[in-house]
Image (cartoon, grey):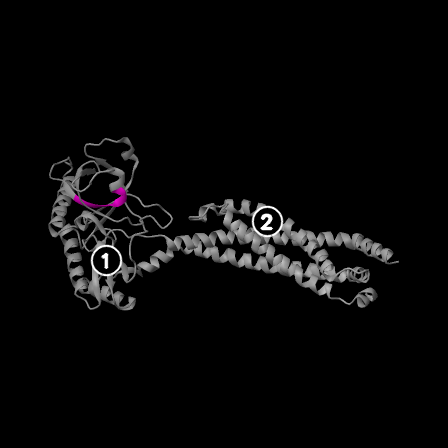
Amino acid sequence: MLNEELKTSVQAVLGPSGRRRILRDALVVGEIAISLALVVGAGLLLRSFAKLREVQTGIRPEGVLTAQVVLPPNKYATLDLAESFFDQLLDGLKGAPGVEGAAVGSKLPLHGGSNGYITIEGNPNPTFEKILVEQNAVTPDYFRVFSIPFLKGRNFTQQDSQDTGQTVRKVVAMMESGKFKPSPDLRLVSVINHTMARQFWPNQDPVGKHFLQGGILAVTVIGIVGDVKERGLRQPVVPQAYYPLAFDLAPPVGSLYVLTKGSVGVGELSATVRRQVHSLDSSLAPFNVSTMQEIISESMTDTSYQSLLLSMFALLALLLTTVGIYGVMAYAVTQRTHEIGVRLALGAHPREIMRLLMSAGAQITFVGVALGLGAAVALSRFLADLLFGVQPRDPSTYVVVAALLSVVALLASYIPARRAAKVDPMVALRYE
Protein backbone atom coordinates (compact mmCIF):
# COMPACT_ATOMS: atom_id res chain seq x y z
CA MET A 1 0.00 0.00 0.00
CA LEU A 2 2.74 2.41 0.97
CA ASN A 3 4.69 1.42 -2.15
CA GLU A 4 1.70 2.42 -4.28
CA GLU A 5 1.51 5.73 -2.48
CA LEU A 6 5.16 6.41 -3.32
CA LYS A 7 4.61 5.55 -6.98
CA THR A 8 1.61 7.86 -7.12
CA SER A 9 3.68 10.70 -5.60
CA VAL A 10 6.51 10.20 -8.06
CA GLN A 11 4.11 10.15 -11.03
CA ALA A 12 2.62 13.42 -9.79
CA VAL A 13 6.04 14.97 -9.76
CA LEU A 14 6.91 13.73 -13.26
CA GLY A 15 3.54 14.61 -14.82
CA PRO A 16 2.44 18.01 -16.11
CA SER A 17 3.56 19.57 -12.83
CA GLY A 18 6.94 17.88 -13.38
CA ARG A 19 7.39 19.79 -16.60
CA ARG A 20 6.67 22.99 -14.73
CA ARG A 21 9.30 21.95 -12.18
CA ILE A 22 11.86 21.52 -14.96
CA LEU A 23 11.05 25.02 -16.19
CA ARG A 24 11.42 26.42 -12.67
CA ASP A 25 14.72 24.63 -12.23
CA ALA A 26 15.94 26.00 -15.56
CA LEU A 27 15.08 29.54 -14.47
CA VAL A 28 16.99 29.08 -11.21
CA VAL A 29 19.96 27.66 -13.11
CA GLY A 30 19.90 30.76 -15.31
CA GLU A 31 19.75 33.00 -12.22
CA ILE A 32 22.78 31.26 -10.73
CA ALA A 33 24.73 31.49 -14.00
CA ILE A 34 23.99 35.18 -14.50
CA SER A 35 24.68 35.96 -10.86
CA LEU A 36 28.03 34.17 -10.94
CA ALA A 37 29.11 35.96 -14.13
CA LEU A 38 28.19 39.36 -12.65
CA VAL A 39 29.85 38.66 -9.32
CA VAL A 40 33.04 37.50 -11.07
CA GLY A 41 33.06 40.69 -13.15
CA ALA A 42 32.52 42.80 -10.05
CA GLY A 43 35.24 40.90 -8.24
CA LEU A 44 37.74 41.50 -11.04
CA LEU A 45 36.95 45.24 -11.12
CA LEU A 46 37.13 45.55 -7.34
CA ARG A 47 40.51 43.82 -7.31
CA SER A 48 41.67 46.19 -10.08
CA PHE A 49 40.49 49.16 -8.02
CA ALA A 50 42.41 47.84 -5.01
CA LYS A 51 45.52 47.38 -7.16
CA LEU A 52 45.23 50.96 -8.46
CA ARG A 53 45.09 52.27 -4.90
CA GLU A 54 48.34 50.42 -4.16
CA VAL A 55 50.20 51.88 -7.16
CA GLN A 56 53.21 53.96 -6.20
CA THR A 57 52.96 57.31 -8.01
CA GLY A 58 56.50 58.34 -7.08
CA ILE A 59 55.28 61.43 -5.21
CA ARG A 60 53.79 62.32 -1.85
CA PRO A 61 50.54 64.12 -2.64
CA GLU A 62 49.62 65.00 0.95
CA GLY A 63 49.21 68.75 1.43
CA VAL A 64 49.98 69.67 -2.20
CA LEU A 65 47.62 72.07 -3.97
CA THR A 66 47.77 72.58 -7.74
CA ALA A 67 46.43 75.47 -9.80
CA GLN A 68 46.80 76.45 -13.45
CA VAL A 69 47.80 79.90 -14.62
CA VAL A 70 47.84 81.20 -18.20
CA LEU A 71 49.69 84.41 -19.05
CA PRO A 72 48.04 86.51 -21.80
CA PRO A 73 50.50 86.59 -24.77
CA ASN A 74 49.86 90.27 -25.52
CA LYS A 75 50.74 91.25 -21.96
CA TYR A 76 53.63 88.82 -21.45
CA ALA A 77 55.19 88.90 -24.89
CA THR A 78 58.75 88.16 -23.78
CA LEU A 79 60.49 85.49 -21.77
CA ASP A 80 61.74 88.15 -19.33
CA LEU A 81 58.19 89.25 -18.45
CA ALA A 82 56.99 85.68 -17.93
CA GLU A 83 60.05 84.79 -15.88
CA SER A 84 59.64 87.89 -13.72
CA PHE A 85 55.99 87.08 -13.03
CA PHE A 86 56.66 83.56 -11.82
CA ASP A 87 59.74 84.61 -9.81
CA GLN A 88 57.65 87.19 -7.93
CA LEU A 89 54.78 84.75 -7.51
CA LEU A 90 57.01 82.09 -5.95
CA ASP A 91 58.68 84.64 -3.67
CA GLY A 92 55.26 85.77 -2.44
CA LEU A 93 53.99 82.23 -1.91
CA LYS A 94 57.07 81.05 -0.05
CA GLY A 95 56.72 83.95 2.38
CA ALA A 96 52.99 83.36 2.98
CA PRO A 97 51.83 81.90 6.33
CA GLY A 98 51.37 78.12 6.31
CA VAL A 99 53.19 77.58 3.00
CA GLU A 100 56.06 75.11 3.31
CA GLY A 101 57.07 75.09 -0.34
CA ALA A 102 56.08 76.43 -3.75
CA ALA A 103 57.07 75.57 -7.30
CA VAL A 104 55.98 75.90 -10.93
CA GLY A 105 55.91 73.17 -13.56
CA SER A 106 54.70 72.84 -17.12
CA LYS A 107 53.23 69.37 -16.44
CA LEU A 108 51.67 67.46 -13.57
CA PRO A 109 52.16 63.81 -12.59
CA LEU A 110 49.51 61.50 -14.11
CA HIS A 111 48.52 64.14 -16.70
CA GLY A 112 51.17 63.36 -19.30
CA GLY A 113 52.34 66.07 -21.65
CA SER A 114 54.81 66.85 -24.38
CA ASN A 115 57.49 64.40 -25.39
CA GLY A 116 60.07 63.85 -28.07
CA TYR A 117 62.99 61.77 -29.24
CA ILE A 118 66.58 62.27 -28.22
CA THR A 119 69.95 61.29 -29.65
CA ILE A 120 72.63 59.93 -27.35
CA GLU A 121 76.02 61.41 -28.03
CA GLY A 122 78.48 58.70 -29.11
CA ASN A 123 75.87 55.93 -29.09
CA PRO A 124 73.85 55.67 -32.34
CA ASN A 125 71.67 52.82 -31.05
CA PRO A 126 68.70 52.52 -33.45
CA THR A 127 66.37 51.39 -30.63
CA PHE A 128 66.78 54.79 -28.97
CA GLU A 129 65.10 56.42 -31.95
CA LYS A 130 61.81 54.72 -30.98
CA ILE A 131 61.80 55.72 -27.30
CA LEU A 132 59.79 58.84 -26.46
CA VAL A 133 61.05 60.95 -23.59
CA GLU A 134 58.60 63.02 -21.52
CA GLN A 135 59.57 66.67 -21.02
CA ASN A 136 58.75 68.86 -18.05
CA ALA A 137 60.04 72.35 -17.28
CA VAL A 138 60.15 73.03 -13.53
CA THR A 139 61.55 75.30 -10.85
CA PRO A 140 64.08 73.72 -8.45
CA ASP A 141 61.59 73.27 -5.59
CA TYR A 142 59.32 71.11 -7.79
CA PHE A 143 61.12 67.98 -6.54
CA ARG A 144 60.89 69.05 -2.88
CA VAL A 145 57.18 69.91 -3.07
CA PHE A 146 56.39 66.46 -4.46
CA SER A 147 59.04 64.72 -2.32
CA ILE A 148 60.72 63.24 -5.41
CA PRO A 149 64.07 61.92 -4.16
CA PHE A 150 67.40 62.73 -5.77
CA LEU A 151 69.28 59.51 -6.45
CA LYS A 152 72.44 61.07 -7.83
CA GLY A 153 73.82 64.42 -8.94
CA ARG A 154 72.35 67.82 -8.15
CA ASN A 155 69.31 70.03 -8.56
CA PHE A 156 68.97 73.10 -10.79
CA THR A 157 70.62 76.31 -9.65
CA GLN A 158 69.87 79.95 -10.40
CA GLN A 159 72.72 79.92 -12.89
CA ASP A 160 71.14 76.95 -14.70
CA SER A 161 67.89 78.90 -15.01
CA GLN A 162 69.70 81.93 -16.40
CA ASP A 163 71.71 79.87 -18.89
CA THR A 164 68.54 78.10 -20.05
CA GLY A 165 66.85 81.46 -20.53
CA GLN A 166 69.75 82.66 -22.68
CA THR A 167 69.60 79.52 -24.83
CA VAL A 168 65.83 79.89 -25.33
CA ARG A 169 66.25 83.55 -26.30
CA LYS A 170 68.83 82.60 -28.92
CA VAL A 171 66.54 79.92 -30.36
CA VAL A 172 63.62 82.37 -30.50
CA ALA A 173 65.81 85.02 -32.21
CA MET A 174 67.02 82.47 -34.79
CA MET A 175 63.48 81.35 -35.54
CA GLU A 176 62.26 84.93 -35.94
CA SER A 177 65.14 85.76 -38.31
CA GLY A 178 64.61 82.62 -40.35
CA LYS A 179 68.30 81.73 -39.99
CA PHE A 180 68.02 78.81 -37.65
CA LYS A 181 71.10 76.60 -37.46
CA PRO A 182 72.80 74.39 -34.87
CA SER A 183 75.26 76.18 -32.64
CA PRO A 184 77.62 75.09 -29.82
CA ASP A 185 76.08 77.87 -27.71
CA LEU A 186 72.70 76.12 -27.64
CA ARG A 187 73.25 74.13 -24.49
CA LEU A 188 70.91 73.00 -21.71
CA VAL A 189 71.07 71.01 -18.48
CA SER A 190 68.61 68.36 -17.42
CA VAL A 191 67.64 66.20 -14.47
CA ILE A 192 66.42 62.80 -15.65
CA ASN A 193 64.43 60.04 -13.97
CA HIS A 194 65.77 56.62 -13.05
CA THR A 195 64.02 54.88 -15.97
CA MET A 196 65.67 57.17 -18.50
CA ALA A 197 69.06 56.60 -16.89
CA ARG A 198 68.59 52.84 -16.99
CA GLN A 199 67.35 52.69 -20.58
CA PHE A 200 69.81 55.06 -22.25
CA TRP A 201 72.91 54.50 -20.09
CA PRO A 202 72.69 50.94 -18.74
CA ASN A 203 75.45 50.04 -16.28
CA GLN A 204 76.82 53.58 -16.53
CA ASP A 205 76.74 56.78 -14.52
CA PRO A 206 74.61 59.16 -16.62
CA VAL A 207 75.63 62.27 -14.67
CA GLY A 208 77.82 64.33 -16.97
CA LYS A 209 76.63 62.49 -20.09
CA HIS A 210 75.17 64.38 -23.06
CA PHE A 211 72.26 63.97 -25.44
CA LEU A 212 70.67 66.02 -28.20
CA GLN A 213 67.16 67.35 -27.70
CA GLY A 214 65.30 67.89 -30.96
CA GLY A 215 68.51 67.21 -32.85
CA ILE A 216 69.96 70.67 -32.10
CA LEU A 217 70.08 71.35 -28.35
CA ALA A 218 73.02 69.77 -26.51
CA VAL A 219 71.84 68.70 -23.07
CA THR A 220 74.04 67.73 -20.11
CA VAL A 221 72.64 65.43 -17.44
CA ILE A 222 73.27 66.93 -13.99
CA GLY A 223 71.08 64.72 -11.79
CA ILE A 224 68.90 61.62 -11.47
CA VAL A 225 65.61 61.52 -9.54
CA GLY A 226 63.10 58.83 -8.67
CA ASP A 227 60.49 57.66 -11.15
CA VAL A 228 57.08 59.34 -11.27
CA LYS A 229 53.91 58.09 -12.96
CA GLU A 230 53.38 60.67 -15.69
CA ARG A 231 50.85 59.09 -18.07
CA GLY A 232 48.39 57.74 -15.53
CA LEU A 233 48.23 55.06 -12.87
CA ARG A 234 47.62 52.30 -15.42
CA GLN A 235 50.56 53.25 -17.62
CA PRO A 236 54.15 52.17 -16.99
CA VAL A 237 56.80 54.67 -15.97
CA VAL A 238 58.44 56.25 -19.02
CA PRO A 239 61.77 58.05 -19.51
CA GLN A 240 61.53 61.67 -18.43
CA ALA A 241 63.77 64.72 -18.65
CA TYR A 242 63.24 67.79 -16.45
CA TYR A 243 64.51 71.20 -17.59
CA PRO A 244 64.63 74.59 -15.86
CA LEU A 245 61.33 76.46 -16.15
CA ALA A 246 62.71 78.93 -18.70
CA PHE A 247 62.69 76.04 -21.20
CA ASP A 248 58.89 76.51 -21.52
CA LEU A 249 58.67 80.30 -21.10
CA ALA A 250 59.20 81.23 -24.73
CA PRO A 251 56.20 83.31 -25.87
CA PRO A 252 53.39 82.54 -26.14
CA VAL A 253 53.53 80.90 -22.72
CA GLY A 254 51.15 77.99 -22.33
CA SER A 255 49.30 76.90 -19.23
CA LEU A 256 51.61 76.30 -16.27
CA TYR A 257 50.93 74.71 -12.88
CA VAL A 258 51.54 76.53 -9.62
CA LEU A 259 52.19 74.07 -6.79
CA THR A 260 52.01 74.87 -3.10
CA LYS A 261 52.59 72.61 -0.13
CA GLY A 262 51.44 73.69 3.27
CA SER A 263 50.35 72.72 6.74
CA VAL A 264 47.14 74.74 6.50
CA GLY A 265 43.81 73.68 5.00
CA VAL A 266 43.05 73.49 1.30
CA GLY A 267 40.77 76.53 1.46
CA GLU A 268 43.45 78.70 3.03
CA LEU A 269 46.11 77.52 0.57
CA SER A 270 43.78 78.21 -2.35
CA ALA A 271 42.99 81.69 -1.03
CA THR A 272 46.72 82.38 -0.67
CA VAL A 273 47.43 81.41 -4.29
CA ARG A 274 44.54 83.51 -5.62
CA ARG A 275 45.61 86.47 -3.52
CA GLN A 276 49.24 86.31 -4.66
CA VAL A 277 48.28 85.99 -8.35
CA HIS A 278 45.83 88.90 -8.06
CA SER A 279 48.44 91.08 -6.34
CA LEU A 280 50.77 90.67 -9.33
CA ASP A 281 48.13 90.96 -12.05
CA SER A 282 44.50 91.75 -11.22
CA SER A 283 43.39 90.44 -14.63
CA LEU A 284 44.61 86.91 -13.85
CA ALA A 285 42.96 84.21 -11.82
CA PRO A 286 44.15 80.64 -11.19
CA PHE A 287 41.82 77.89 -12.39
CA ASN A 288 41.48 74.09 -12.03
CA VAL A 289 42.45 74.47 -8.39
CA SER A 290 42.60 71.03 -6.78
CA THR A 291 44.69 68.95 -4.44
CA MET A 292 47.05 66.32 -5.79
CA GLN A 293 45.12 63.69 -3.86
CA GLU A 294 41.97 64.70 -5.77
CA ILE A 295 43.83 64.35 -9.06
CA ILE A 296 44.95 60.85 -8.10
CA SER A 297 41.38 59.95 -7.10
CA GLU A 298 40.04 61.30 -10.40
CA SER A 299 42.43 59.04 -12.29
CA MET A 300 40.62 56.09 -10.68
CA THR A 301 37.10 57.44 -11.22
CA ASP A 302 36.27 55.25 -14.22
CA THR A 303 37.28 52.04 -12.49
CA SER A 304 35.55 52.97 -9.21
CA TYR A 305 32.31 53.90 -11.00
CA GLN A 306 32.29 50.73 -13.06
CA SER A 307 33.11 48.67 -9.97
CA LEU A 308 30.23 50.24 -8.03
CA LEU A 309 27.75 49.77 -10.87
CA LEU A 310 28.66 46.16 -11.56
CA SER A 311 28.75 45.39 -7.82
CA MET A 312 25.20 46.69 -7.45
CA PHE A 313 24.00 44.47 -10.29
CA ALA A 314 25.93 41.53 -8.86
CA LEU A 315 24.44 41.95 -5.37
CA LEU A 316 20.96 42.24 -6.86
CA ALA A 317 21.53 39.10 -8.93
CA LEU A 318 22.87 37.28 -5.86
CA LEU A 319 19.80 38.30 -3.86
CA LEU A 320 17.44 37.16 -6.62
CA THR A 321 19.32 33.89 -6.89
CA THR A 322 19.03 33.25 -3.15
CA VAL A 323 15.33 34.08 -3.13
CA GLY A 324 14.77 32.04 -6.28
CA ILE A 325 16.44 28.90 -4.94
CA TYR A 326 14.69 29.25 -1.61
CA GLY A 327 11.32 29.71 -3.32
CA VAL A 328 11.78 26.74 -5.64
CA MET A 329 12.95 24.47 -2.82
CA ALA A 330 10.13 25.59 -0.51
CA TYR A 331 7.59 24.96 -3.26
CA ALA A 332 9.14 21.58 -4.05
CA VAL A 333 8.91 20.59 -0.40
CA THR A 334 5.25 21.64 -0.35
CA GLN A 335 4.56 19.57 -3.47
CA ARG A 336 6.30 16.54 -1.98
CA THR A 337 4.86 16.79 1.52
CA HIS A 338 2.70 13.67 1.04
CA GLU A 339 5.70 11.75 -0.36
CA ILE A 340 7.83 12.87 2.58
CA GLY A 341 5.14 11.64 4.97
CA VAL A 342 5.13 8.24 3.28
CA ARG A 343 8.93 7.96 3.46
CA LEU A 344 8.93 8.91 7.13
CA ALA A 345 6.17 6.38 7.79
CA LEU A 346 8.28 3.71 6.10
CA GLY A 347 11.06 4.48 8.56
CA ALA A 348 13.18 6.97 6.63
CA HIS A 349 15.41 9.01 8.93
CA PRO A 350 15.00 12.84 8.83
CA ARG A 351 18.64 13.09 7.71
CA GLU A 352 17.79 10.98 4.67
CA ILE A 353 14.93 13.34 3.82
CA MET A 354 17.27 16.30 4.11
CA ARG A 355 19.86 14.56 1.95
CA LEU A 356 17.23 13.78 -0.68
CA LEU A 357 16.03 17.37 -0.90
CA MET A 358 19.50 18.92 -0.62
CA SER A 359 20.75 16.76 -3.50
CA ALA A 360 18.13 18.36 -5.76
CA GLY A 361 19.33 21.82 -4.73
CA ALA A 362 22.96 20.77 -5.21
CA GLN A 363 22.26 19.55 -8.75
CA ILE A 364 20.66 22.87 -9.68
CA THR A 365 23.57 24.74 -8.10
CA PHE A 366 26.22 22.63 -9.84
CA VAL A 367 24.68 23.15 -13.28
CA GLY A 368 24.21 26.88 -12.66
CA VAL A 369 27.79 27.36 -11.43
CA ALA A 370 29.20 25.44 -14.42
CA LEU A 371 27.24 27.58 -16.89
CA GLY A 372 28.07 30.71 -14.91
CA LEU A 373 31.81 30.07 -15.13
CA GLY A 374 31.52 29.85 -18.91
CA ALA A 375 29.51 33.09 -18.99
CA ALA A 376 32.08 34.77 -16.72
CA VAL A 377 34.91 33.85 -19.07
CA ALA A 378 32.97 35.41 -21.97
CA LEU A 379 32.18 38.55 -19.93
CA SER A 380 35.81 38.97 -18.86
CA ARG A 381 36.82 39.64 -22.48
CA PHE A 382 34.82 42.86 -22.38
CA LEU A 383 36.41 43.86 -19.07
CA ALA A 384 40.02 43.30 -20.16
CA ASP A 385 40.62 46.99 -20.97
CA LEU A 386 39.24 48.06 -17.59
CA LEU A 387 41.38 45.74 -15.49
CA PHE A 388 44.69 46.63 -13.88
CA GLY A 389 47.08 44.18 -12.26
CA VAL A 390 44.52 41.37 -12.61
CA GLN A 391 44.13 38.86 -15.42
CA PRO A 392 40.64 38.53 -16.99
CA ARG A 393 40.72 34.83 -16.10
CA ASP A 394 42.21 35.22 -12.64
CA PRO A 395 41.77 31.74 -11.07
CA SER A 396 41.48 32.92 -7.47
CA THR A 397 38.58 35.25 -8.28
CA TYR A 398 36.69 32.53 -10.14
CA VAL A 399 37.25 29.96 -7.37
CA VAL A 400 36.25 32.31 -4.54
CA VAL A 401 33.11 33.53 -6.32
CA ALA A 402 32.07 30.01 -7.33
CA ALA A 403 32.54 28.81 -3.75
CA LEU A 404 30.63 31.81 -2.35
CA LEU A 405 27.70 31.34 -4.70
CA SER A 406 27.61 27.60 -4.03
CA VAL A 407 27.45 28.18 -0.27
CA VAL A 408 24.68 30.76 -0.67
CA ALA A 409 22.70 28.47 -2.97
CA LEU A 410 23.09 25.43 -0.73
CA LEU A 411 22.12 27.49 2.32
CA ALA A 412 18.97 28.58 0.50
CA SER A 413 18.23 24.88 -0.11
CA TYR A 414 19.06 23.83 3.44
CA ILE A 415 16.37 25.88 5.20
CA PRO A 416 13.31 24.32 3.44
CA ALA A 417 14.96 20.87 3.52
CA ARG A 418 15.49 21.12 7.28
CA ARG A 419 11.90 22.21 7.76
CA ALA A 420 10.69 19.24 5.68
CA ALA A 421 12.73 16.78 7.75
CA LYS A 422 10.89 17.89 10.90
CA VAL A 423 7.39 17.42 9.49
CA ASP A 424 4.98 15.19 11.42
CA PRO A 425 4.42 12.01 9.31
CA MET A 426 0.71 11.88 10.20
CA VAL A 427 0.20 15.50 9.11
CA ALA A 428 2.15 14.84 5.92
CA LEU A 429 0.12 11.72 5.06
CA ARG A 430 -3.13 13.67 5.39
CA TYR A 431 -1.75 16.54 3.20
CA GLU A 432 -3.26 16.84 -0.28
Q: Is residue 128 visible?
A: yes
Q: Looking at the image, which residue is at 60% across and 58% down?
A: 408
SS under mark 2 = helix
Residue 383 horizontal side relative to residue 161, left or right: right
How far from the left and from the top, in percent, is residue 326?
Answer: 66, 61
Structural crowding at the residue carrying mark 1, measured as other residues with C-alpha within 10 Å and reported as few (<14), some (14–19) or many (≥20): many
Q: Along the horizontal axis of the image, is 392 left or right of 31?
A: left
The boundaries of the magenta stretch are: 189-196
Residue 372, numbered label: 2
Camera-side residue of 168 and 11? 11
Amino acid type of the residue tagged 1 in the rendering: Val
Residue 124's place in the image compared with 394, above or below, is above
First reached walking from the N terminus: tag 2 or tag 1: 1
Task: Determine the residue positioned at 23% across, 64% down.
Answer: 273
Q: Picture coordinates of residue 196 (x, y %)?
A: 26, 42
Q: What secondary structure is the magenta-colored segment mainly? A: strand
Say which quadrant the C terminus sits in.
bottom right
Closer to the camera in the image, 141 or 343: 343
Q: Mark 2 to mark 1: distance in Å? A: 50 Å
Toward the viewer: 158 or 2?
2
Image coordinates of residue 195 in percent, x first then y, are 28, 43
Q: What residue sits 70% from the left and 61% below the top?
A: 417
Displayed quadrant of residue 240? top left
Q: Which mark is residue 145?
A: 1
Is residue 78 visible to the viewer in this orientation of the structure? no
Locate residue 173: give its quadrant.
top left
Q: Quadrant of the N terminus?
A: bottom right
Q: Quadrant of residue 133?
A: top left
Task: Give the secondary structure at mark 1.
Answer: helix
